[in-house]
Amino acid sequence: MFPSKDNLTICFAHAAYQMQARFEQRKTGIKSFQVWAYDDLVKRIAEADIVVASGMWKNDLIPHASKLKFIQSISSGMDQYSKEQLGAKGVRLASAAGVNAKAVAEHAIALILAIFRRLPEARDNQHKKMWRGMIGDLGQREDELGGKTLLVVGMGRIGSHLALLAKAFGMKVIGIRRDPSQGENGADSIYGMGDLVKLVPQADIVALTCALTPETTGLMSAAAFKAMKSASVFVNVARGKVADEAALIDTMKNNRIWAAAIDVTAEEPLPAASPLWTLPNVFVTPHTAGETRAYEDNVIDILVENLDRLWRDEKASLRNQVL
């Protein structure tokens, strides 16, 4: 039986997001508390009927979560949750898919613009107080996006919004998705995941926006990198493990493509020894594509909607339901 509103306690667990503060502004009357560190979550998880968390969640918590009925993830990625263990305890689980789709798509466009307008180099030169002269080599000069072909791998919420933004710049968009029969979602043409290597040579930019699943792990393979045009750009705002990171590093070390802009890496934080930090043709942002000032409120909108459904005993129709 799902607890009534008067008997419910929510634990918000995040190291940075102001989840409880934003929740309290809604004056729901529901008891809640926030923990900022994993050790505190371990100590207090037994108090919670609901946990709202993302990266702080570890499945080792499950045996200690005696009251836990529902986890509302703060993120769209769900690989940190053991569906088997949670299902065995009857714990419901929902993702936050879509809460930052616009932010991630805008970040992807920002990375693309940064590369084509050479903004990282401009920032570096500013720190060195160096006024760079004009570039005679056409292959190295700043460029425009109009007329370029963007291959978007993953045509869900993020990919479809990225396609919309790309079209505003006059780009052609080729989409790849798990089930092409679901439609183009803003792309000019749509294909299945198995067509990636065949389509890569057509693209000026290859952008990963898909979820990390067994099917997409390593999808951007050594063969896919090898098939890219020498003047093309690789962008990853999906998950680090969607790309073969060793193949990416090899590609960039040998200057086989023009540049890469990545927001995610196979291991995060990116280890200090990784060549990705210092390769001149790689631009790295620290998994911030999804950051937005609206994030907390967007997640709480989903949480509140799912609470209403749980109270109505609509357990099988939660928004973004995973379990």
Image: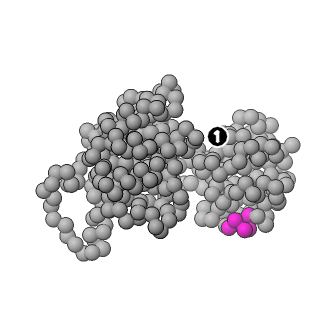
- In the image, residue 144 lies at what x, y percent? 24, 47
Q: Residue at x 39, y 41 (%)?
A: 224
Disc 1 packing (10 Å; few <14; some 14–19; many ≥20): some
Residue topped by disc 1: 320
Residue sticking out furthest to the left: 136
The quadrant of the image that shows the N terminus is: top right
The number of discs equals 1
Please name whichever residue, 119 or 272, is drawn nearer the observer in this view of the structure: 272
- In the image, residue 146 lies at what x, y percent? 26, 41
- In the image, residue 90 lies at what x, y percent? 81, 43
**Colouring used for the render:** one colour
- In the image, residue 7 lies at what x, y percent? 85, 53
Occupied quadrant, residue 117: bottom left
SS assignment at label 1: loop
In this picture, residue 30 sits left or right of residue 100: right
Please name whichever residue, 76 or 232, is drawn nearer the observer in this view of the structure: 232
| One can see residue 221 in this view | yes
- Residue 287 lies, with reference to residue 211, above or below; the image says below
* Stretch in magenta: 37-41
Q: Main secondary structure of the magenta part?
A: helix
Q: Amino acid at mark 1?
A: Asn
Q: Residue at x 44, y 43 (%)?
A: 221
- Residue 96 lies, with reference to residue 281, above or below; the image says above
The quadrant of the image that shows the C terminus is: top right
Q: Is residue 293 magenta?
A: no
| One can see residue 31 in this view | no
Q: Residue at x 46, y 67 (%)?
A: 273
